[in-house]
Amino acid sequence: MARKTGTPTADLLKGSDGIDWLDGRGGNDTLKGYAGNDELDGGAGNDRLFGYSGNDELDGDSGDDVLHGGLGHDELDGDGGNDRLFGGSGNDELDGGAGRDRLFGGTGRDWLEGGRGNDTLTGGSGADVFEFERGDGRDRITDFTNGQDRLHLDDFSRAQVQAVIDTARQSGDDVVLSLSAGSSVRLENMRVADLDIGDFVF
């Protein structure tokens, strides 16, 4: 594994056609993994991470970061800050972390979790799963496809999920699910009559 480490200032770190480990450290960095199954850590600062091909792991760390998985089955973690995560192609896992994040799954069967803060999630094409938990904030899903996509409510029993369904309300063209005080999920362009237990995974 090739290792490259940045400095406290802005760096450009480039990987190889093999397996790379890139650590930006401080500064507003740009990290490019290229081919291979790479690990990219932006460190502190507002960073831009590009996995390209391979099954990559991208961690924005602190700051307002932009993460692009690219090809392959990638894992993207925004961590702290207001981040934007793009899975690209493949079956990706996206976790916004704390902050007001925007997640885009892209193509494939993706798993999206906004984390703490008021987040916006877009699964893209494919059968995606959107995960939420109490205390996450006021989140929204822009493209939930009934009968294809699923919701996962972490640490909710089946009975508790049914209670969420029973208290779901119509808000214009959208459905709003209440998870706890201050925590909700808005499903855009959805009808409350179409929501049932089959829309959830356990």
Image: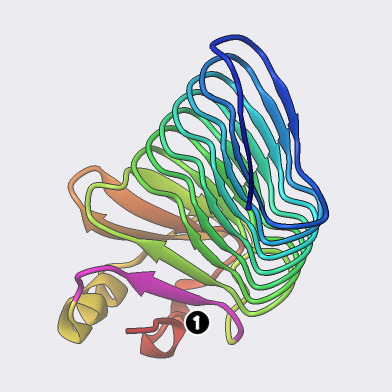
> At 20% from the left edge and 70% from the top edge, which residue is drawn?
155
Q: Is residue 75 above or below residue 50?
A: below
Q: Is 17 or 199 nearer to us in this picture?
A: 17
Q: Is residue 2 left or right of residue 191?
A: right
Q: Position of residue 50 (x, y in %)?
A: 73, 43
Q: What amino acid type is highlighted by mark number 1?
A: Asp
Q: Is residue 55 left or right of residue 78?
A: right
> At 33% from the left edge and 67% from the top edge, which residue is drawn?
168
> At 58% from the left edge and 74% from the top edge, which residue is drawn?
128
- Residue occupied by mark 1: 194
Q: Is 195 or 198 nearer to us in this picture?
A: 198
Q: Residues within 10 Å of mark 1 (few under 14, many from 20)?
A: few
> At 65% from the left edge and 54% from the top edge, which residue is drawn?
38
Q: Is residue 61 left or right of residue 16?
A: left
Q: Is residue 120 a member of the stretch shown in magenta?
A: no
Q: Is residue 151 left or right of residue 65?
A: left
Q: Is 98 or 45 nearer to us in this picture?
A: 45
Q: Which residues make up the magenta segment?
A: 148-156
Q: Is residue 152 a member of the stretch shown in magenta?
A: yes
Q: Position of residue 104 (x, y in %)?
A: 66, 53
